[in-house]
Image (tube, rainbow, N blue to C red):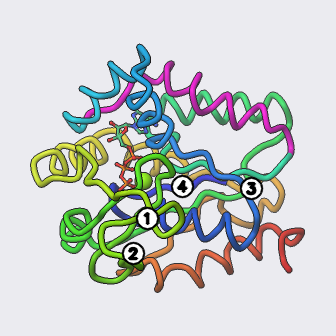
Amino acid sequence: MLILGCPGSGKGTLSARVEKHFGIPIINAGDVLRWHIAHETDIGRQARDVIHNGQLMPDSIMMQLIGEKAISMGDHDWLLDGFPRTAGQADMLLQALHEQHTPLTLVVNLRVPESIILQRILERWTHIPSGRVYNLSYNPPQRPGLDDVTGEPLEKRDDDNPDTFKLRIDSFHAKTEPMIERLRSERCVYDPSRPLLVDLAGETSNAIWPKLRAAIEERCPHLVK
Ligand code: ATP
Ligand code: MG
């Protein structure tokens, strides 16, 4: 399954709920890149500038880092957050999944009004090693400034500022939206009466969560508890 949506639309928050509720492992593209930055690898050095400038990493690198991880899971369930983000990435992923006879079950597209997203990003604090996110207004940490699980300090992501956010939204409109429109025409191969992509709209992740849970339960009966 894929979870798509503009920066700050709640992909990370909702994937964490999917992982907890359904026990599905998540692969988060941004977290993998931030791991490389923290460990000062060659990819990390390139990613630092790209992320700071709100641009996108090259498709081939992202396919190696993220796409191949998903493909290697065979027919186990998994959820990708932050990949694919371009038509090129989507083509590579769908082609590889088709070849190994494990096509996608569901693509979720989160639709959150852009007018409220910048405020959410500015109020967001992140535990960088795990990717856990908190929001000062509606999902604050139990102890101010500290991660609930590890007690380690929370940080602002380098790209969660108004200038970089504008560039991230521009990249989303230019590169990711056309990909979403293309995926919108795909059917679910397991049930061709349904489209592959489902739009879920709401102003908060709490409002979207019941719709997401219902969409997963409908498409993946084996996950219903
Ligand atoms: P949010 O975390 O609020 O959902 P986001 O989706 O923009 O926002 P991340 O997924 O953490 O943030 O990605 C951060 C940055 O990493 C992106 O702005 C981009 O520079 C880079 N990146 C992440 N995924 C990809 C990808 N699939 N292709 C190219 N670059 C990527
Ligand atoms: Mg994210």
**Residue 184: mark:** 4
Q: How many marks?
A: 4
Q: Is residue 201 above or below residue 167?
A: below
Report which quarter residue 155 is drawn in: bottom left
Measured as percent of width and height from the top left, residue 72 is found at: 78, 31
Camera-nearest label, 3 or 2:
2
Q: Which residues are magenta?
A: 55-75
For the point 23% across and 52% down, which residue is it?
160
Q: Give the spatial CA distance, label 3 vs label 2.
A: 34 Å
75 or 34, which is in the foreground? 34
Measured as percent of width and height from the top left, residue 88 is found at: 49, 28
Taking the magenta stretch, the answer to whether it contains residue 64 is yes
The residue at the far left in this view is: 163
The amino acid at mark 1 is Asp
48 or 108, which is in the foreground? 48
Q: Are there few (<14), some (14-19), or many (20+) residues within 10 Å of tag 1? A: many
Q: Secondary structure at mark 1?
A: loop
Q: Give the spatial CA distance, label 1 vs label 2.
A: 6 Å
Dot 1 or dot 2, earlier in sequence:
2
Measured as percent of width and height from the top left, residue 91 is found at: 58, 31
Magenta span main SS: helix
Residue bearing the label numbered 1: 147
Dot 3 or dot 2, earlier in sequence:
3
Measured as percent of width and height from the top left, residue 108 is found at: 56, 62
Dot 1 or dot 4, earlier in sequence:
1
Taking the magenta stretch, the answer to whether it contains residue 158 is no
Residue bearing the label numbered 2: 141
Q: Are there few (<14), some (14-19), or many (20+) residues within 10 Å of tag 4? A: some
The residue at the far front in this view is: 151
The amino acid at mark 2 is Pro
